[in-house]
Amino acid sequence: MKYLFIALYIPALTLTLFSQETEYKANCTANVISGCCIEYYYDYHACCHLRCCCKCYHECGRRQRSISDNEFRKLIRNLNNLWFEIDRIENITAAIDNNYFRTSQVRTLLQILWFESSKVEIAKYIYPKITDKGNFHTLYDLFNFQSSLSEIREFIMNYR
């Protein structure tokens, strides 16, 4: 009786998985037709609540929405409650891994950090996740040392 019970539910599970895969493929196929990606990498994107291919999401730029103002305010509030620079860096890098940012938001994040080396580290780490990279030059005034500025400029040149 136990085996019969399992056998009855496995096809239902298979059907559910197949329908989800079809949904993913349908979204990705639409993007392939529009010419913004080549391969199917299925993933869930929290910013737009769509299941699509990662390659399309990261390369075509259509769904790169920066973190919402409300979520960003929560992040800043949490960062201001941390005492140690290393804790702030860990929290900022975790936020960068899961979100995109506008240059104005990056300015606020860099101003929270105390040490120049930390600012350089975060600026280089966040650069790929900035939605308006053309405005990145407006952040140069946050760096006190020419060597820091040179390091960031060199990183940006090599990034392209």
Image (spheres, grey):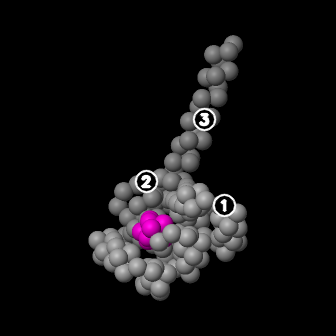
- Real-space Cα separation, disc 2 to disc 3, in angstroms: 22 Å
Quadrant where the N terminus sits is: top right
Query: Closer to the observer: label 2 or label 3?
Result: 2
The foreground one among 82 and 98 is: 82
Residue 141 percent across, percent down from the top left: 47, 85
**In terms of secondary structure, what is the magenta stretch mainly?**
helix
**For the residue carrying disc 1, how many other residues have a C-alpha within 10 Å: few (<14), some (14-19), or many (20+)?**
few
Residue name at image x 55 percent, y 70 percent: 114
Residue bearing the label numbered 2: 41
Q: Amino acid at mark 3?
A: Leu
Q: Which residue is mark 3?
A: 13
Confirm whether the magenta stretch covers residue 124.
Answer: yes
Of the residues shown, which amino acid type is indicated by label 1?
A: Leu
> Dot 3 surroundings within 10 Å: few (below 14), some, or many (20 or more)?
few
**What residue is shown with label 1?**
82
Is label 2 in a helix, a strand or a loop? loop
